[in-house]
Image (cartoon, rainbow, N blue to C red):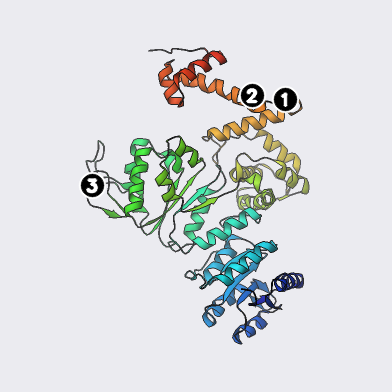
Amino acid sequence: MNGATILIADDDRAIRVVLDQALGRLGYDVRSTDKAATLWQWIGEGQGDLVITDVVMPDGNGLDLIPSIRKRRPDLRIIAMSAKNTLLTAVRAAERGAFDYLAKPFDLNELIGLVQRALSRAEPAEPGDPAALAETLPLIGRSPAMQNIYRVMARLMATDLTVMIFGESGTGKELAARALHDYGKRRRGPFVAVNMAAIPRELIESELFGHEKGAFTGAVARGVGRFEQAAAGTLFLDEIGDMPLDAQTRLLRVLQQGEFTTVGGRIPIKADVRIIAATHRDLRQAIRQGQFREDLFYRLNVVPIRLPALRERSEDIVELARHFLTLAAPAGEGPKTLDAAAQQRLREHSWPGNVRELENLMRRIAVLYGQNVIGADIIEIELAGASPLAGEDGQPRNESLSEATERHLRQYFTAHRPGLPSSGLYERVLREVERPLLGITLEATRGNQIKAAELLGINRNTLRKKIRELDIEISRGVG
């Protein structure tokens, strides 16, 4: 839609010049100002087909101006920009009715694409109901990866769409789910979280849907399930990849029909909840292996959000560390800062435990050290002494197979880097993993090769061949 008029309000002259030139070359008529008052005057005169406004300007706040613009010119689309690029800013922009939000510094091609989409869209999205938002930020980070997540989450706040959050352990999946709830349309309802991996398989259906008195041995009274507890709110199903197949079937039925019955019950109950699921597993691989229902995956994966590992957003590490030090200060010996060397050491660490590992490290430092300035020597000591399997309470935590494999591979590469083979590493690693896998499986089946082959999902003849090739000793066990 070349020929459209774009109104730009930004107190940064360089940004105004760049946008004026870039959009002008595409045939748009561009008018720019550094004042919110001038922008409002132009809008009142009926000028403009699109507004691009900064959030903070000398004479006003761009976000505060958006509702007035929407009221006066409902068809005028607005793109908000801000250097204060947090989830809170993105949410506020969406709630006030902005077409979209863009973090500074921005990619010029991305902005041009956004302008073109805004001008080609007949009606802007309706804003969500304004809410009094707390100043505490549910997620921390200004990296490009986090900015994309903020934008997606801001668009989801006013909806009931089902969300699937992917990410390694410790990346903050529950934190993201809570943010979607706390800033969403169901924020006045309960947030109920349930970890599928922590519930015995035989109790999952009762835990989710409740049970009637006498439904099974030990059911001495009616039990209220998590779906009922979360009524009018959000149900967060963490580690959904660990849900047994029979429970998956029942969950799928609930998502399809919008109602459920308790275990032993007959009267349907409306499922008035928003579902947010999360997993650290590769569910597509689980589907191929017959461990997860494909139809349930597509019901849950309406809007996928992938939280990056901390090593993928290294520019956020220092900001996160400062945040956790501030939170831990009351339990320690006063506020602490990180010197330049300490900050650099934090950036160099691989963070296999992700944000959770960093938070635990800052908690320990806040409590154990009296220095006001933390140096690299302290970081080095704590990183060397910390167990990668330590949980938030200091006790061993369950480590996934992929986490354990990655940790050992990193240790192997670090220790053997000078002597790594020039080729054939892939086959070598597979062989190293294959031998203990087959050996442990045979131990678990007490040497029964038919059961072991079934458990492994391979042909019995293939298993026998591998046993010979790898010289695996078969133990028949006891009993």
358 vs 23: above or below = above
- Residue 37 % position (x, y): 66, 82
14 vs 424: above or below = below
> Upstream in the sequence, badge 2 or badge 1?
1
| Quarter of the image where the N terminus is located | bottom right
Question: Residue 478 lies in what quarter of the image?
Answer: top left
Answer few, some or many: residues within 10 Å of disc 3's Cα (few below 14, many 20 plus, some between 14 and 19). Answer: some
The residue located at (35%, 41%) in the rendering is 247
Answer few, some or many: residues within 10 Å of disc 1's Cα (few below 14, many 20 plus, some between 14 and 19). Answer: few
Circle 1 or circle 3, nearest the eye: 1
**SS for callout 2:** helix
417 vs 280: above or below = above
Which label number is shown at residue 421? 1
Q: Amino acid at mark 2?
A: Arg
Which label number is shown at residue 265? 3
Distance in Å between CA atoms under marks 2 and 1: 9 Å
Instruction: Please name the residue that numbered disc 2 is placed on.
Output: 428
CB of mark 2 within 8 Å of CB of mark 1? yes
Q: Amino acid at mark 3?
A: Gly
In front here: 291 or 347?
Answer: 291
> Upstream in the sequence, badge 1 or badge 3?
3
- Residue 418 % position (x, y): 76, 27
| Quarter of the image where the C terminus is located | top left
